[in-house]
Image (cartoon, helix red, strand yellow):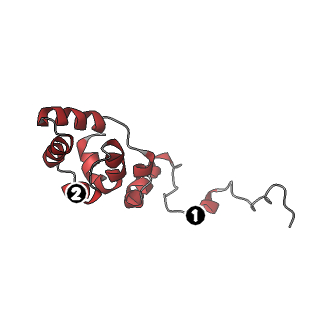
């Protein structure tokens, strides 16, 4: 993840941060609001390590893929819908009803059940 993506999705990434740094306080992490310098300083204090080492650990964490729970967080809904538009056929819009584009028929009966 690049840092701009991290800043944009900071609240959704709080869980990943708390998993990576279990001693971190959620309210404090959220209050940092993606400020890299403040985050590095916080990790330095949290782990009682020099800021240079904390910077390395933050850089290592930031190079991981965005966790699925962060990618699917409700705060990202608009962005996710927008990104989905890249996969649509010409003429289809992300918020269009699926039945307009075929392939949708009456739902099958659940397996093992009768009406």
- Vertically, is 74 above or below 40? below
Left/right placement of residue 101 relative to residue 33 reads right
Seen in the picture, residue 18 relative to 115 is either above or below; the reply is above
- For this orientation, the residue located farthest to the right is 114
Residue that label 1 marks: 97
State the CA–CA distance, disc 2 to disc 1: 41 Å
Dot 1 surroundings within 10 Å: few (below 14), some, or many (20 or more)? few
Query: Are the residues tagged 2 and 1 within 8 Å (C-beta)?
Result: no
Residue 36, compared with residue 99, is above or below; it is above
Residue appearing at x 51%, y 49% in the figure: 88
Hey, which quadrant is residue 65 in on the image?
top left
Quadrant (top left, top right, bottom left, bottom right) of the N terminus: top left
Instruction: Give the percent coordinates (x, y) of residue 50.
Output: 12, 35
Residue 44 image-quadrant placement:
top left
* Residue 28 disc label: 2
Side of 67 where 103 appears, left or right: right
- Earlier sequence position, callout 2 versus callout 1: 2
């Amino acid at each position: 993840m690049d840092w701009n993506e991290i800043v944009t999705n900071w609240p959704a990434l709080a869980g990943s941060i708390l998993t990576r740094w279990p001693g971190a306080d959620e309210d404090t992490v959220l209050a940092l609001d993606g400020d890299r310098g403040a985050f590095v300083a916080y990790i330095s204090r949290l782990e009682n390590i020099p800021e240079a080492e904390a910077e390395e650990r933050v850089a290592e964490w930031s190079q991981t893929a965005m966790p699925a729970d962060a990618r699917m967080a409700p705060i990202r809904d608009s962005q996710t819908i927008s990104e989905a538009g890249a996969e649509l056929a010409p003429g289809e819009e992300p918020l269009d009803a699926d039945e307009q584009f075929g392939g949708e028929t009456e739902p099958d009966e659940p397996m093992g059940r009768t009406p």
